[in-house]
Amino acid sequence: MTIKSYQEQVQGVVAKAIDTVEEQYKAVSAASFGYAEKLYKLDTVKAKHDEYATKAYGAARDANKRVGEYAGDIILKFEKPVAPVKKAAKAPAKKAPAKRKPAAKKATAAA
């Protein structure tokens, strides 16, 4: 495995972590606002909250992308790119020859 592939894996893990945290955060904030809305009218506050949260997670994604690109550029200085490995097309499977039944033995009459 190359350093570049490790870098790409780490970047992918970070991207998934951002998505997961955002999803959980939205669930918690929705529940919190749901309870608060029972007591107060919070549409404007919730709209601003959602706007800022969207910007924050977008910034985290942008940062992950930039760090990944920067790391990728540094890695390419030390490691040559690896050509993608093409998977060989599988040859069609040959049918196994049909098993022949043993020839029936002729009964010989004993005289």
Image (cartoon, rainbow, N blue to C red):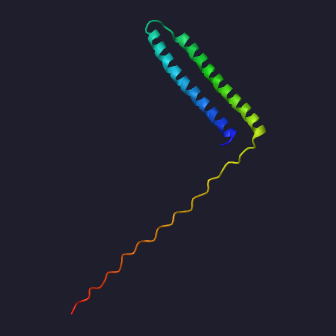
Left or right? Give the position of 105 relative to 29: left
Residue at x-position 61% and y-position 16%: 52
- Name which quarter of the figure residue 45 lies in: top right
Left or right? Give the position of 84 relative to 98: right
Residue 107's place in the image compared with 39, above or below, is below
Left or right? Give the position of 69 relative to 20: right
Residue at x-position 74% and y-position 31%: 70
- Name which quarter of the figure residue 74 lies in: top right
Whole-percent x, y for residue 54 in the image = 60, 21
Whole-percent x, y for residue 27 in the image = 49, 20
Residue at x-position 66% and y-position 39%: 5
Q: Nearer the viewer, residue 37 or 15?
A: 15
Residue 24's place in the image compared with 90, above or below, is above
Residue at x-position 51% and y-position 63%: 93
- State the quadrant of the N terminus: top right
Whole-percent x, y for residue 18 in the image = 59, 26
Residue at the top extreme of this rendering: 40
Left or right? Give the position of 22 relative to 108: right
- Name which quarter of the figure residue 104 lies in: bottom left
Residue at the right extreme of this rendering: 77
Q: Nearer the viewer, residue 107 or 73?
A: 107
